[in-house]
């Protein structure tokens, strides 16, 4: 049951922003669970690079620029740096 509790916290808090402007509780920085910060970056990247009825998908380079532009405000800088590093080393993992 403790694993399910932790998964619930990750899901609940993945829309918190690193600068404290997110929801549902306005947590910031290290107060946001570590895995929720990672999920927030991953989910945003997926949204940016997926075709949506209301918005065309971004290219990999556009998505990287967007993540970097929001690093430290919307997103945990360490999570952004890690994902960007992976994407630059292995860009073929996308798609």
Image (cartoon, rainbow, N blue to C red):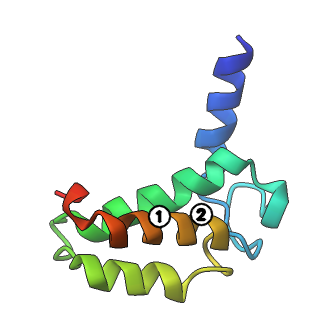
| Residue 28 in sight here | no
Residue beneath disc 2: 79
Q: Does residue 87 appear left or right of residue 6 in this picture?
A: left
| Mark 2 closeness class: few <14, some 14–19, many ≥20 residues within 10 Å | many
Q: Is residue 3 above or below residue 22?
A: above
Q: Nearer the viewer, residue 84 or 5?
A: 84
**SS at mark 1?**
helix
Front residue (pair 62, 17): 62
Q: Based on the displayed image, in which of its 4 quarters is residue 61 positioned? A: bottom left
Label 1 and label 2: CA atoms lie apart by: 6 Å
**Which mark is drawn over residue 22?**
none
Vertical position of residue 5 compared to residue 87: above or below: above
* 6 over 13 or under it: above or below: above
Q: Nearer the viewer, residue 87 or 75?
A: 87
Name the spot of residue 22 as percent of width and height, x first. 67, 67
Is the C terminus in the top left, top right, bottom left or bottom right quadrant? Answer: bottom left
Residue, x 84% and y 56% (percent of image)? 31
For the question of whether residue 63 can be seen, the reply is yes
In the rendering, at what x and y percent does residue 78 appear? 65, 67
Left or right, 21 with reference to 39: right
> Which residue is most to the front?
89
For this orientation, the residue located farthest to the top is 1
Residues at discs 1 and 2 in contact (Cβ within 8 Å): yes
The location of residue 92, given as percent across then percent down, is 19, 61
Secondary structure type for disc 2: helix
Q: Within the image, what quadrant is residue 58 found in?
A: bottom left
- Which residue does the numbered mark 1 point to in the structure image? 83
Q: Residues within 10 Å of mark 1 (few under 14, many from 20)?
A: some
């Amino acid at each position: 049951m403790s694993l399910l509790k932790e998964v619930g916290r990750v899901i609940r808090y993945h829309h918190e922003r690193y600068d404290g402007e997110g929801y549902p509780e306005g947590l910031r920085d290290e107060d946001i669970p570590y895995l929720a910060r990672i999920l927030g970056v991953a989910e945003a990247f997926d949204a940016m690079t997926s075709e949506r009825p209301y918005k065309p998908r971004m290219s990999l380079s556009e998505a990287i620029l967007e993540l970097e532009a929001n690093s430290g405000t919307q997103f945990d800088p360490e999570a952004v740096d890690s994902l960007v590093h992976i994407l630059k080393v292995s860009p073929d993992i996308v798609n």
